[in-house]
Image (cartoon, rainbow, N blue to C red):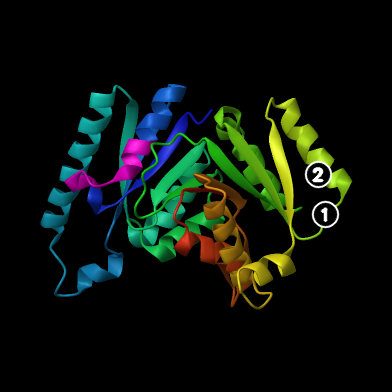
Amino acid sequence: MYRNIIALLGDRLAFSDSNVLDVAINIAKRSDGHILGAYVLPFTSAMFSTSNVADVESLHNKTEVMHEKFESEIRAADVNGDWCNTQRDDAVAEVARQSLYADLIIFSRVEIHQSTVDKVLLTACCPMLMLPPSNISDGSFDNVLVAWKGTREAARALHDALPILHKANDVLIVIFGESNNDEKQSMISYLAVHGINARVEEQSQESFLAEHGMQGDSDKSIGHRLLTLSKDEERDLIVMGAYGHTRLSESVLSGVTHTVTRSAEMPVLMSH
């Protein structure tokens, strides 16, 4: 169960236009959980030295409005929660610290600055549920696609998704690239021990690209391949590992993860 939930909140909360808190509340109610509302301020420390930035008092007032809205929502839902806020340039470190004691982080990619999202994905210690811009999900997922690759990240994502997979009606495991019967059987057996009946399919890179008129063998093509398959299969959630690599001493997202985090039209549960 996801009992300690971090909801990364942006300015939409003030206008009741944030689905992040709604989803967090629904998940928390099913698990008798707790929500930490983490409001990421749309400012960095350096911005306060410029002349065109609102003063500290107005920012404080705005934060109070967000806090009051959060308290009102969780009180109405009879859910326990706490509140914190952080500036954008401190958000990654703060969320990484809070994730040490969390089961799930929920965010919308249109509410949190993309660079913050990218860094949190690679530093958080718990799974992250990313909601798309036009999210309609309430946090219940019936048809789930798990993107499998024989890596630590994919294995962790599968493990972290078990509370969701237990309740899903249809679980499809898609193995990207070459596999063998032992790998497929191991996957089926692992999930069966947890009471989950899943279908396992293998996707050939070449046949998929030919079928959809795509060219190339890049990570970007694989990312689009995953999204196209999820849409064709009418999945309401993708489960996948969040991959990264180091460039110029800075961790950045891999091509597949980069594509999915910017283009997915359905929620995505990711673990690194």
- Horizontally, residue 247 falls left or right of residue 22, namely right
Question: CB of mark 1 within 8 Å of CB of mark 2?
Answer: yes
| Crowding at mark 1 (Cα within 10 Å: few <14, some 14-19, many 20+) | few
Residue of label 2:
184
Residue of label 1:
179
Mark linked to residue 271? none
Q: Position of residue 173 (x, y in %)?
A: 68, 45
Question: In the rendered structure, does residue 127 fall within the stretch colored magenta?
Answer: no
Which quadrant of the rendered structure holds the N terminus?
A: top right
Seen from the viewer's position, the closer of residues 57 and 129 is 129
Res 33 quadrant in image: top left
Cα gap from disc 1 to disc 2, whole angstroms: 7 Å
Regarding mark 2 in the picture, which secondary structure is present there? helix
Residue at coordinates 19% horizontally, 75% vertically from top-left? 50
Residue at coordinates 11% horizontally, 55% vertically from top-left? 57
Q: Can I make out residue 34 in this image? A: no
Residue at coordinates 49% horizontally, 39% vertically from top-left? 104
Range of residues picked out in magenta: 13-23
- Horizontally, residue 105 falls left or right of residue 201, namely left
Question: In the rendered structure, does residue 20 fall within the stretch colored magenta?
Answer: yes
Q: Which circle's residue, 1 or 2, is located before the other in the chain?
A: 1
Amino acid on which the number 2 mark rests in the picture: Lys
Q: Position of residue 135 (x, y in %)?
A: 37, 48
Q: Position of residue 36 (x, y in %)?
A: 37, 37
Seen from the viewer's position, the closer of residues 177 and 228 is 228
Seen from the viewer's position, the closer of residues 40 and 271 is 271
Regarding mark 1 in the picture, which secondary structure is present there? loop
Amino acid on which the number 1 mark rests in the picture: Ser
* Magenta stretch: helix, strand or loop mostly: helix
- Horizontally, residue 13 falls left or right of residue 105, namely left
